[in-house]
């Protein structure tokens, strides 16, 4: 599919989600079973993005998908209000507030603490 001005490979089961969230054109030959309407397509893409990219800024998925940053920010804020994403300054000396999946942040914290404990040993 053409997404954000680039040709991208995506899983066939995600064709409807990308179409509905980004307005991408479905490639020919996709079975109808994968072309049904999807519930909250942009939210589901953002949650997946957060799971894979750990800490990110609003501009990152907006640039990747060729969306207005305002549309991405609005959806991210909705997800944060629902408790699905966290928004804050997570890096030491960070200059920008970033977005993160709560479970990814817990994993990063566990790994950081394990590394510090090992250094103390």
Image: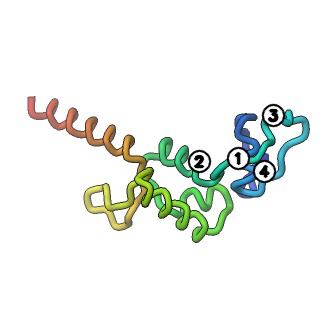
Disc 3 crowd rating (10 Å Cα; few below 14, some 14-19, many 20+) is few
Q: Secondary structure at mark 3?
A: helix
N-terminal label among 4 and 2: 4
Q: Quadrant of the C terminus?
A: top left
Q: Name the residue beneath numbered marker 4.
A: 2
N-terminal label among 3 and 1: 3
Quarter where residue 107 is shown? top left
Residue 110 against residue 64 in the figure, above or below: above
User: How many numbered circles are shown?
Assistant: 4
Q: Residue at x 70, y 40 (%)?
A: 14
Residue 95 against residue 11 in the figure, above or below: below
Q: Is residue 54 rendered to the left or right of residue 18?
A: left
Q: Position of residue 48 (x, y in %)?
A: 55, 44
Q: Position of residue 77 (x, y in %)?
A: 48, 64
Q: Secondary structure at mark 2?
A: helix
Quarter where residue 27 is shown? top right
N-terminal label among 3 and 2: 3
N-terminal label among 3 and 4: 4
Circles 2 and 1 in contact, beta carbons < 8 Å? yes
Q: Residue at x 76, y 47 (%)?
A: 37
Disc 1 crowd rating (10 Å Cα; few below 14, some 14-19, many 20+) is some
Q: CA distance from mark 4 to mark 2?
A: 19 Å
The outermost residue toward the left is 121
Q: Residue at x 90, y 40 (%)?
A: 28
Q: CA distance from mark 3 to mark 2?
A: 19 Å
Q: Is residue 64 rendered to the left or right of residue 97?
A: right
Q: Secondary structure at mark 1?
A: loop
Q: Name the residue beneath numbered marker 2.
A: 44
Q: CA distance from mark 2 to mark 1?
A: 9 Å
Q: Name the residue beneath numbered marker 1.
A: 38
């Amino acid at each position: 599919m053409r997404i954000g001005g680039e040709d991208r490979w995506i899983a066939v089961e995600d064709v409807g989600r990308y179409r509905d969230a980004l307005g991408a054109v479905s490639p020919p030959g996709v079975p109808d079973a994968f072309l049904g309407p999807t519930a909250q397509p942009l939210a589901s893409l953002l949650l997946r993005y957060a799971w894979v990219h750990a800490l990110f800024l609003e501009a990152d998925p907006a640039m990747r998908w060729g969306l207005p940053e305002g549309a991405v920010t609005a959806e991210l804020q909705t997800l944060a209000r629902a408790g699905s994403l966290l928004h804050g300054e997570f890096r030491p000396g960070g200059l920008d507030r970033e977005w993160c999946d709560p479970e990814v942040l817990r994993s990063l914290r566990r790994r950081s603490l394990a590394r510090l404990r090992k250094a103390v040993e």
